[in-house]
């Protein structure tokens, strides 16, 4: 494209974009933004700055205008979403509801920035796979995590107790082997007596370890139970919220997968809605004027 053609293209583009703004045509405004991003290989979020000569106030005005129509449409497209004027998307109207994400005006997508937001869909997928046992499995995982240290100490205690229980038998066998019976054996025991005196020290050491492990195990179990009791309620609440979310989804969609598919096509669906109803933005403006 030579200079003259390039300048002519820009002139026509800005003329058309200005007309779209004057006509309150959300469809043509978005088409202009998309075409510019494609032609100049820009991110959609960069296009308003380019079109409006990096005037921050003008960009904010355009964003606020486009966001109003997008928010109103999304509340109809996914009715169980509550979307604030500034684009915060909340899942449902129940207590303990979760923030699903933030509506991005330029991309026409719901962006999930936090780990909590990104965890919602995986939670729902896990729930959908086995709704009846979702809570039970989460509580079982919590129990295993809380009691992991206590279980480890229990294993060590059992090993120590087995060692103490086996020691008298070992001493008896050792004594029998050394004595060999009769007068010769008695003389050997008398000669080896200093070695035998060391045996009780080993037994006392093992018994001391057992007592220490029993004390540690008792404390670990108490700590584990306290953690389990504290976090159990939170997991029950989270499971109830996930259930509410899932029930809301299947009341509107045939499956969770269909809902996820609709999320991926918000931009296409919105543009199709604008194309099907060119007067949508004009009607919105008329409603504002009559308010």
Image: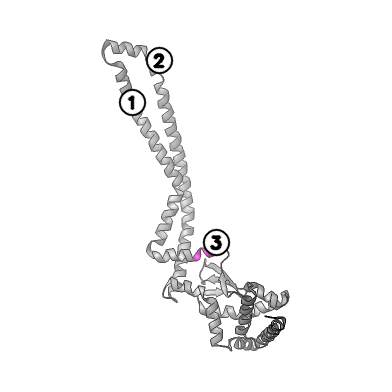
114 within the magenta span:
yes
Residue 59: name its quadrant. Answer: bottom right
Point out the tag, 3 or 2, that comes first from the N-terminus: 3
Point out the tag, 3 or 1, that comes first from the N-terminus: 3
Q: Residues within 10 Å of mark 3 (few under 14, many from 20)?
A: few
Residue at image position (56%, 81%) is 271
Front position in the image: 64 or 7: 7
Residue at the disc numbered 1? 170
Q: Could you tell me how far apart the alpha carbons at marks 3 and 1 are, in whole angstroms?
A: 58 Å
Residue 279: name its quadrant. Answer: bottom right
Element class at badge 1: helix
Please give left or right for residue 277 compared with residue 17 in the image: left
Residue at the disc numbered 3? 115
Provide residue 102's location: percent of width, then percent of height.
58, 70
Quadrant in the picture for the C terminus: bottom right
Which numbered circle lies on residue 37?
none
Front position in the image: 172 or 103: 103
Provide residue 111's location: percent of width, then percent of height.
57, 69
Residue at image position (44%, 36%) is 213
Depicted 185 relative to depicted 104: above or below:
above
Which numbered circle lies on residue 194?
2
Residue numbers of the magenta segment = 112-120
Q: Residues within 10 Å of mark 1 (few under 14, many from 20)?
A: few
Provide residue 41's location: percent of width, then percent of height.
63, 73
């Amino acid at each position: 494209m030579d200079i003259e053609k390039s300048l002519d293209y820009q002139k026509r583009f800005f003329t058309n974009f200005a007309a779209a703004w004057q006509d309150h045509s959300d469809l043509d405004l978005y088409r202009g933004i998309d075409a510019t991003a494609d032609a100049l290989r820009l991110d959609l979020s960069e296009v308003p700055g380019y079109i409006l000569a990096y005037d921050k106030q003008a960009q904010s005005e355009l964003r606020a205008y486009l966001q109003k129509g997008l928010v109103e449409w999304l509340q109809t497209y996914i009715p169980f979403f509550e979307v604030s004027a500034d684009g915060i998307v909340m899942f449902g109207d129940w207590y303990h509801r979760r923030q699903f994400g933030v509506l991005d005006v330029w991309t026409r997508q719901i962006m999930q920035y936090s780990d909590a937001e990104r965890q919602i869909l995986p939670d729902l997928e896990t729930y959908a796979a086995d709704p009846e046992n979702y809570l039970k499995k989460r509580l079982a995982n919590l129990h295993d995590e809380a009691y992991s240290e206590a279980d480890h100490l229990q294993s060590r205690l059992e090993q120590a107790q087995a060692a103490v229980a086996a020691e008298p038998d070992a001493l008896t066998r050792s004594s029998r082997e050394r004595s060999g019976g009769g007068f010769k054996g008695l003389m050997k025991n008398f000669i080896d007596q200093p070695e035998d005196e060391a045996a009780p020290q080993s037994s006392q050491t093992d018994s001391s370890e057992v007592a220490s492990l029993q004390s540690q195990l008792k404390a670990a179990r108490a700590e584990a139970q306290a953690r389990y009791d504290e976090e159990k309620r939170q997991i029950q609440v989270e499971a109830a919220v996930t259930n509410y979310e899932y029930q809301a989804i299947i009341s509107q969609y045939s499956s969770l997968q269909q809902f996820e598919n609709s999320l991926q096509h918000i931009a296409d669906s919105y543009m199709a809605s604008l194309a099907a109803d060119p007067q949508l933005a004009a009607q919105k403006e008329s409603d504002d004027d009559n308010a």
